[in-house]
Amino acid sequence: MTAILDTSFLFALTDRSDRHHQRVLAIAQSTNETFVLPAIVLPEICYLLASRLGHQVMRHFVSSLTAQAVRVESVTAEDLVRVREILEQYADSQLDFTDAAIVCIAERLSITRVYTLDRRDFSIIRPRHCDYFELVP
């Protein structure tokens, strides 16, 4: 199965002092899923890692991104139309651009599983291709 990665999961996986680290580490080590990393997540996670944990941690994270570990997926021009629709539809929830882009990429690639700790945003979204996202953990 293929799953999509969100910033919150990646941050907890990288930050050994994060209260969710052990749980997400165990999950990451026990799965054999193919992971899609939206390219739009990269600047967000790199900024968080560098600003909170240091530049060396961020560099180590970037060096761990191999073709075997993740498939990086860009936002297309067509995706931007859907991102705008999602942002409008969930304007009351103040969904951010990155989360809307993750939803859009998941819809385009028919991915139903999202590795995230952001349950609030991803639990309210009703994607086009399925009734709801399966959120891990």
Image (tube, rainbow, N blue to C red):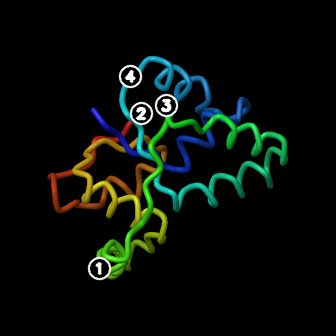
Q: Identify the residue at the far front of this view.
A: 67
Label 1: few (<14), some (14–19) or many (≥20) C-alpha neighbours in 10 Å? some
Which residue is under mark 3? 68
- Choose the circle earlier in sequence order: 2 or 4: 4
Amino acid at circle 3: Gln
Q: Residue at x 64, y 60 (%)?
A: 43
- Choose the circle earlier in sequence order: 1 or 4: 4
Amino acid at circle 2: Pro
| Side (left or right) of 136 relative to 85 | right
Nearer to the camera, 96 or 33? 33
Which residue is under mark 4? 32
Amino acid at circle 1: Glu
Q: Position of residue 122 (x, y in %)?
A: 36, 55
Q: CA distance from mark 3 to mark 2?
A: 22 Å
- Choose the circle earlier in sequence order: 3 or 1: 3
Numbered disc 4: secondary structure: loop
- Choose the circle earlier in sequence order: 2 or 1: 1
Label 2: few (<14), some (14–19) or many (≥20) C-alpha neighbours in 10 Å? few
Which residue is under mark 2? 137
Q: CA distance from mark 1 to mark 4?
A: 33 Å
Q: Residue at x 31, y 41 (%)?
A: 113
Residue 123 vertical position relative to residue 70 in the rendered view, above or below: below
Q: CA distance from mark 2 to mark 4?
A: 15 Å
Label 4: few (<14), some (14–19) or many (≥20) C-alpha neighbours in 10 Å? few
